[in-house]
Image: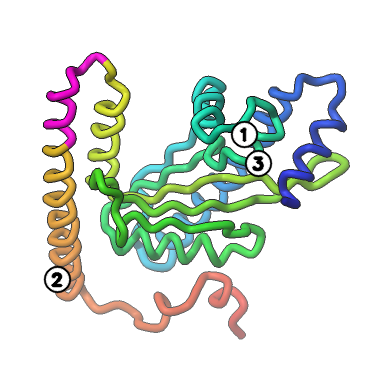
Amino acid sequence: MRSEQQVEAALKSYEDVDSWKTIIFLYNAALKEVGTKLEILNDEFQHVHQYNPIEHIKTRIKTPDSIVKKLKRYGHETSIENMVRYVNDIAGVRLICSFTSDIYRLAEMIGNQSDLKVLSIKDYIKNPKESGYKSYHMLVSVPIFLSDSVVDTKVEIQIRTIAMDFWASLEHKLRYKKEIPEAEAVQMAEELTECANVIADWDKKMGEIRNRIERYSEEKDESLPAIGLARIINRD
């Protein structure tokens, strides 16, 4: 509730600017804040472990049309207040990883950020949707420091493997292609569910092979990977 009240107060303080532009400004600022944090975490991981857990970072702001459709689907009137309160994925960040283990490692790193508040978590990897959809969703709020106020703004972070993202992209196309005959769409959906199971096995196998490769890698300093960069810098 505090976040919604802050946003509403911020909107009222910009009387000469269209409310829609103001709210999108806040969400764009939130994406920049979260994106920078993620890039720093990725760089730190590379510095300490010589490995990047993030393959790609994608960001987006939900379109007005998508926001309105979602509000109607939830049974809410179209308004700025309802948009902020009920649509949690207006600002979205998608992290693409190589391995499933990277997903949980990144989620832990994000959760440890002192100025990010984790509002909710949905683990669709351990509990996939009926369609076969798998991804790890985190809803966080990030403080946006304006000239005269601080506004906590929500950002949804989705973390997936490359294979999960490929599957989700294809499933999204199927879901929104209304011209496909119903019987054909049902068959495609069933085939996609089968593909999701194959992808899960593939992700698991790739992770196992990566672990075997690492076991044969040259042994490195055991103490350095075990501590974060901040502790390295602050050591006597």
Q: Give the label, 1 or 3, closer to the camera.
A: 3
Mark 2 surroundings: few (<14), some (14-19) or many (≥20) residues within 10 A: few
Q: Classify residue 147 as left or right of residue 117.
A: right
Q: Is 120 inside the magenta-drawn segment?
A: no
Q: Spatial distance from mark 3 to mark 2, Cα to Cα?
A: 47 Å
Tag 2: amino acid: Arg
Q: Classify residue 194 as left or right of residue 18.
A: left
* Position in image of residue 23 (x %, y %): 69, 31
Q: Earlier in the sequence, mark 1 or mark 3?
A: 1
Q: Earlier in the sequence, mark 3 or mark 2?
A: 3
Highlighted range, magenta: 179-189
Residue visible at 12% across and 45% down?
194
Q: Give the label, 1 or 2, closer to the camera.
A: 1
Main secondary structure found in the magenta portion: helix
Residue visible at 61% across and 85% down?
236
Instruction: Determine which residue is flagged by label 3.
Output: 85
Tag 1: amino acid: Asn
Tag 3: amino acid: Arg
In depth, the one of 12 and 32 nearer the eye is 12
* Residue 15 position (above or below residue 6): above
Residue visible at 34% across and 54% down?
124
* Position in image of residue 18 (x %, y %): 76, 19
* Residue 67 position (above or below residue 200): above
Q: Is 184 inside the magenta-drawn segment?
A: yes
* Residue 45 position (above or below residue 147): below
Instruction: Determine which residue is flagged by label 2.
Output: 212
Q: Spatial distance from mark 1 to mark 3, Cα to Cα?
A: 17 Å
Picture quadrant of residue 53: bottom left
Instruction: Determine which residue is flagged by label 1.
Output: 28
Q: Earlier in the sequence, mark 1 or mark 2?
A: 1
Q: Classify residue 34 as left or right of residue 168.
A: right
Label 3 residue SS:
helix
